[in-house]
Amino acid sequence: MTHPIPPGTRDILPDEMRELRRLSVALIEAFERFGYGEVSTPTIEYEEVLARGGESGAPVAYRFFDERGELLAMRSDMTIPIARLIANRYAGAEPPFRLCYLATAYRAVRPQRGQMREFTQAGVELVGVPAPQGTVEVIEVLSAALDAAGLSRAVIGLGDADLYRQLLDELGVEAGASERLLACLAAHDHVGLEAEVARLDLGAGERETLVRLPTLRGGPEVLDSARDLGGAATARASERLAATYDGLRARGGADRVNLDLGLLRDLGYYTGAILEVYDPALGHVLGGGGRYDGLMARFGWPLPAVGFALHLERLHVAQAEEERFAATAGDGPARGPERGS
Amino acid sequence: MSGIAGPIRTGSDGPLTLAVPRGALFSGTLDLLDTIGIETAAPRGDSRSLIFRTEELNLVTMRPSDVPTYVEAGAADLGVTGKDVLGEQRDRAVYELLDLGFGACRMVLAGRRGDRSLDEAERRLGAMRIATKYPRTTQRWLAHSGHQAEVIEVKGSVELAPLVGLADGIVDLVDTGRTLAENELEVREEIEICTARLVANRVAHKLRAVEIDALADRLREAAAR
């Protein structure tokens, strides 16, 4: 290669671009059908603004000084820029706000992992509608977007960012141990979780609840299992999740939703419901989201908010794999080599 | 059951695919599969195949350090590998489901027998030089234990490094300790015990929850025996 480009970036040629364009248009049209207007924000912002997502938000990776010495940064997602946009441009307007986007975002890559520094997200933000209605609406939009992308087998995982923490509080687990348990859960380390739980000064039943609860995932029966397992404390901790699920069921939108009591996303601004998107044709998560009811307050306007972002390039890979699957359907399902990151 | 040479097809309908580590954990993994009634005669044979199909599971065999790669990408739904491998590849997004108990080895700091250069180097030169195949595990342990050291990554026989003066000591995985003894090295500190672990792909863990949990429960029971 005589004229290199930075690792984690890429050129897109016409054949791929045509398919990506078709996919993007289908997604944006799906968002617009639900009343979400498309917006665009600058790729670069003041670093201080992007830092308001908090320390465990999607970390900003690229910072630089402009000609006047101001510290700028490349956005790492669209949630924070849109929170800023609403605070600036809709001040005085009546919420709720329904916005969508198709935009590049920038994150640090780990060496030799084929990860992208620059990637495209398609998503929505619903600001000003609290749980559970807001969450239910956004899941319906997400479901419609997956259908528009032709991913009829895709599944939406629904969990609650505070459920496990609340259960630890209910059981009176001290703060240091709680943080260690939550760190294990966020790292998907169930072996470490079990070892930490074994060290807690709790009854055998309570210890079993703490180990087994995060393994519960599936249909509505999951909520019953949780209640059977942990009684009142678990029922209280899973109340919000149950309310969201009931809301979905009432609107007939629960079919492709997979309840997941162990789901924990690592973005610091999530509160309450969290989402992940899976397709059986791809080993990687296609996108995610959730509620971030505390974020708008950091821009001086406390409003409840919820949203999701889909990874456009991975959706495209999943589309291609689903086509292969459909082509060989009589022959058993196919799963191809991984091409996303 | 037969070893097959062609590509396997997996997905939400076929059998689960399990990544099986060749090497030190190979026979322990196959013994455990035997215990839960999965036929392992073919992978035990001298076939050169890498893929073996049973009624219940597709077994794909590979280097232990490749297991997290295949499982993260979803090319295998589940895998067995050592905690030492997972410790080096913490950024792989896989679920660690189960401690399978077998294959226990110790990750240790070792130095030359009767030689004080490890302590002396830290005391007089401010840092010990440690050669290892496990640089991330070593760095993490150093950060926790408050030692100051220069970590030198090597790929092959790490015992050589202190013998010829590349390093003052080594961090390595020790089973019986015979290799250390033969090279006149001795354990100075134990860092952790590493056993075989069952890992799962993030998507398979959600979309094939019932099958994965049932298999994990059987493996847990078998491992406890």
Image: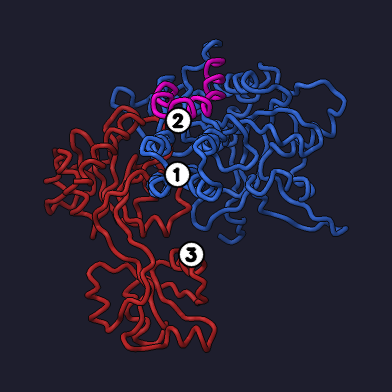
On residue A188, which mark appears?
1
- Eyeballing the image, is A100 above or below B82? above
Instruction: Report how far apart the C-alphas of labels 1 and 2 lie in the structure.
Output: 19 Å
Numbered disc 1: secondary structure: loop
Q: Which residues are magenta?
A: A223-248
Q: Percent from the top left, x then y, of residue A309?
A: 61, 33
> Residue at point 85% right, 59% down?
A69
Report the mark closest to the observer, 3 or 2: 3
- Eyeballing the image, is A111 above or below B113? above
Q: Percent from the top left, x then y, of residue A212?
A: 39, 35
Q: Is residue A232 magenta?
A: yes
> What amino acid type should be assigned to the residue bearing mark 2?
Asp
Q: Is residue A68 magenta?
A: no
Q: Quadrant of residue B214?
A: top left
> What amino acid type should be assigned to the residue bearing mark 1?
His
Discs 1 and 3 share one subunit: no
Residue B221 horizontal side relative to residue A179, left or right: left
> Residue at point 64% right, 29% down?
A307
Q: Nearer the viewer, residue A190 or B153?
A: A190
On residue A279, which mark appears?
2
Chain identifier, red in the render = B
- Eyeballing the image, is A173 above or below A62? above
- Magenta span: predominant SS is helix
Regarding residue A173, the answer to whether it shows in the image is: yes
Q: What residue sits right under mark 3 in the picture?
A: B140
Q: Nearer the viewer, residue A198 or B174?
A: A198
- Eyeballing the image, is A6 above or below A92? below
